[in-house]
Image (cartoon, rainbow, N blue to C red):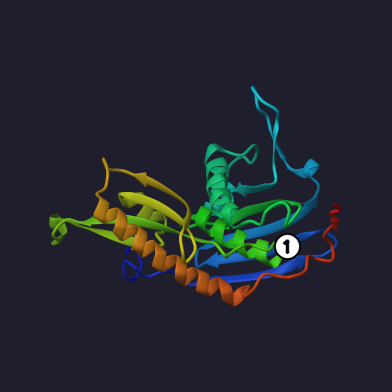
């Protein structure tokens, strides 16, 4: 591995913690993967009037019951820049993390709240979007949202063992890639899910395409990585909280 003494399937150390921000209905979770750090807040709001409104030119405006807002300031990679409207990258990464978590959410009848998750990346050397998936799952569980299951994500990469370096040209699939492996490698394959399936994935390639055996190997290796991350996440939040925060609004449904 680039700059590290690691095997191609080895992952970095995972650390997570949580706390309640008093006087507000916010749940804060810190998810850290060595040099990748995600700061989380979960807010539960009552009523569909607090949903995210999406303008539609042809139909009635849509209200989203669950939305994830992803923020990646320039300081996360040691740079100085302007902070304003979300960039295309931030919107895309937020949508990927949102799609990964959405299948695990309870129905509106079971949990009649609008759910907003905010991810602010404070340091990044890898896939911050997959760290957002892991931290978001922890924040939802810790905040009392009865998820169907925990969701984790991992970024897979690929390099070729070229003959110029004494190899035989075999593609090597890397687990939990860092920034340099993403920049120098040929693939960035983000996979999110749990032990039984995949909820979202996204692949960026610098080559014409990959073969079916490479795809199968990458998915199988990603599945093992996701199981490892889920096991580490369970140490911080072993079971979903059965009670909402005392600072969260109360909704009573009458039939």
Give the SS element for disc 1: strand
Relative to 87, residue 247 above or below = below
Decide: few, some or many residues near mark 1? Use Cα within 10 Å; few <14, some 14-19, many ≥20: many
Residue 190 at what x, y percent from top left?
A: 43, 53
**Left or right relative to 169: residue 51:** right
How many discs mark residues in the rendered view? 1
Q: Quadrant of the N terminus?
A: bottom left
Q: Residue furthest top?
A: 58
Which residue occupies 86% across, 53% down?
254
Q: Residue at x 51, y 74 (%)?
A: 231
Q: Which residue is mark 1?
A: 27
Estimate the x, y position of residue 48 in percent, counting from the top left: 78, 43
Residue at image coords 46%, 69%: 227
Q: Which residue is pictured at 82% across the width and 65% down the height?
A: 22
**Residue 23 location, x and y as percent?**
85, 61
Q: Is residue 215 above or below residue 151?
A: above
- Residue 224 falls left or right of residue 118: left
Quarter of the rendering containing residue 87: top right
Whole-percent x, y for residue 61 in the image: 70, 30
Comparing 189 with 53, the one in front is 53
Classify residue 165 by image quadrant.
bottom left
Relative horizontal placement of residue 8, taking residue 122 as reference (left or right): left
Q: Determine the residue located farthest toward the front in the rendered image.
A: 255
């Amino acid at each position: 591995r680039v700059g590290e003494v690691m095997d191609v399937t080895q992952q970095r150390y995972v650390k997570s913690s949580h706390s309640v921000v008093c006087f507000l209905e916010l749940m804060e979770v810190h998810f850290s993967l060595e040099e990748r750090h995600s700061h989380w807040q979960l807010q539960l709001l009552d009523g569909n009037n607090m949903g995210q409104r999406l303008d539609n030119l042809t139909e009635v405006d849509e209200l989203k019951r669950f939305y994830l807002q992803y923020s990646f300031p320039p300081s996360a990679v040691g740079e100085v820049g302007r902070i304003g409207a979300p960039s295309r990258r931030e919107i895309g990464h937020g949508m990927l993390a949102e799609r990964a978590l959405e299948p695990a959410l309870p129905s509106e009848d079971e949990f009649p709240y609008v759910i907003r998750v905010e991810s602010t990346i404070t340091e990044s050397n890898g896939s911050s979007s997959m760290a957002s998936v892991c931290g978001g799952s922890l924040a939802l569980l810790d905040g009392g949202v009865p998820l169907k299951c925990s969701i984790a994500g991992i970024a897979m990469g690929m390099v070729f063992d070229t003959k110029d370096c004494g190899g035989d040209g075999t593609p090597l699939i890397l687990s939990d890639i860092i920034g340099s492996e993403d920049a120098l490698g040929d693939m960035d394959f983000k996979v999110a899910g749990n032990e039984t399936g995949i909820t979202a994935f996204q692949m960026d390639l610098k080559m014409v395409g990959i073969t079916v055996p490479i795809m199968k190997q990458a998915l199988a290796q990603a599945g093992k990585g996701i199981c490892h991350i889920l096991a580490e996440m369970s140490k911080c939040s072993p079971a979903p909280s059965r009670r909402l925060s005392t600072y969260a609004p109360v909704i009573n449904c009458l039939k």
